[in-house]
Image (tube, rainbow, N blue to C red):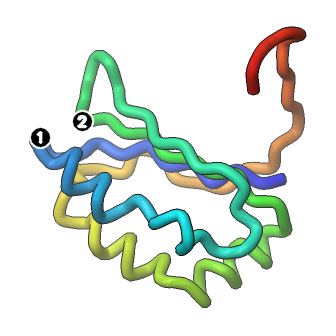
Amino acid sequence: MLCAHTVRRLKPGTYDDFKAAFTPKPDEFPAGWVRFHALRGLEDENQVVTFGFFDGTLEELERGQAESDFEERRAAIEPYVEEVIVNGVYEVENTLVPEGAHA
């Protein structure tokens, strides 16, 4: 399992436009993606963390991005992004779910 993760600082007042441009519709997710999250900072509402989990190899993830509208969506959010702080793909090494927790 892979996790694609990006931390961005948005231009003030652009979160709603960013979200509309970035979030794929449920029927537009490329094969292999199992979950997606977007987080917004409590202390800095312009800091946004996005990450998703991909069930496949890095090569499959990259091929899916090349075959989908990934670059178009990335270009569509550019006007709202002040800075990309962190961007990468990580291998999920460990997952813990406390007993009784709702995952």
Residue 88 drawn above or below residue 92: below
Residue 94 spot, x, y in % from top left: 88, 32
**Looking at the picture, which amino acid does disc 1 mark?**
Pro
For the view shown, which residue lies furthest in the bottom direction? Answer: 67
Q: Are marks 2 and 1 in contact (CB under 8 Å)?
A: yes
For the view shown, which residue lies furthest in the left direction? Answer: 13
Q: Nearer the viewer, residue 84 or 36?
A: 36
Residue 44 drawn above or below residue 14: above
Residue placed under numbered mark 1 in the picture: 12
Q: Is residue 96 left or right of residue 78?
A: right
Whichever of callouts 2 and 1 sits on the residue coming sooner in the sequence is 1
Residue placed under numbered mark 2 in the picture: 46
Q: Quick one: label 2, few (<14), some, or many (20+) residues within 10 Å?
A: some
Q: Nearer the viewer, residue 67 or 23?
A: 23
Quadrant of the drawing holding the C terminus: top right
Secondary structure of residue under mark 1:
loop
Residue 63 drawn above or below residue 58: below
Residue 58 spot, x, y in % from top left: 78, 69
* Residue under the image location 37 percent in, 51 percent down: 84
Residue 2 spot, x, y in % from top left: 77, 54
Q: Nearer the viewer, residue 84 or 22?
A: 22
* Residue under the image location 64 percent in, 74 percent down: 30
Q: Is residue 27 left or right of residue 31?
A: left
Distance, label 2 to label 1, CA atoms, is 6 Å
Secondary structure of residue under mark 2:
loop
* Residue under the image location 54 percent in, 74 percent down: 28
